[in-house]
Amino acid sequence: MLSVMTPERVALARFMEDRKRWLRVSWREVAERGGTTEETLRRVRQGLVDTIIDASKSAIEAGLEWPFGTVESILANRNTIDLITAPRTRPAPDPAERVDSALRATYRRILAVRGQAVADQWLADTEELSREPRADTESDTA
């Protein structure tokens, strides 16, 4: 298949790459966030699809945290905002979510190696510890 690299498609590919770098994510993460595949993103960037369907446009916008309609604006040569450092369309993840993610990953590793009972006990112990006040966060009233 011949590449369809009009000036607008070249601009889209460039904006996608620059935005990905600015967000500091991989194409895999962009695909996961957008609900598409890395292959679809690659084919769009390389101009290997004649027409970019609406679902792919939405996936690109979600994955790169662009506002709705951004891809269409680029393709129509109407981009009037800074597409690289534009504000995220959703808030940055709460640091607590990263901790929860790390706990889930640890749970899965324990589950895979040691079994359900050990993993469930570790999770219960972790939840109990997280409810206890830490000594370094208590205020000294004396």
Image: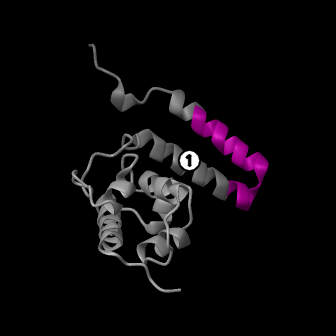
Quarter of the image holding residue 78?
bottom left
Dominant secondary structure, magenta: helix
**In front: 41, or 47?**
47
In the image, residue 120 sits, relative to residue 141, either above or below, namely below
> Which residue is drawn at the image coordinates 51% and 55% (left, top)?
54
Q: Nearer the viewer, residue 133 or 65?
A: 65
Q: Nearer the viewer, residue 75 or 44?
A: 75
Tell me the residue that label 1 is attached to: 103
Where does the image place residue 120, in percent across and percent down from the top left? 72, 43
The amino acid type, in three-letter code, at marker 1 is: Leu
Q: Is residue 119 magenta?
A: yes
Q: Is residue 131 left or right of residue 125?
A: left
Q: Position of residue 101 (x, y in %)?
A: 53, 48
Residue at (37%, 78%) from the top-left corner?
A: 5
- The quarter of the image holding the C terminus is top left
Classed neighbour count for the residue bearing mark 1: other residues with Cα under 10 Å, few (<14), some (14–19), many (≥20): some
In the rendered structure, which segment of residues is drawn in magenta? 110-127
Q: Secondary structure at mark 1?
A: helix
Is 1 placed left or right of 119 in the picture?
Answer: left
User: Image point 49% across, 68% down: which residue?
Assistant: 51
x then y, percent, for residue 59: 50, 56
Give how far across and how far down residue 79 sits, in percent.
Answer: 25, 55
Outermost bottom residue: 2
Residue 41 vertical placement versus 129 (above, below) = below
Quadrant in the picture for residue 64: bottom left
Q: Is residue 44 above or below residue 119?
A: below
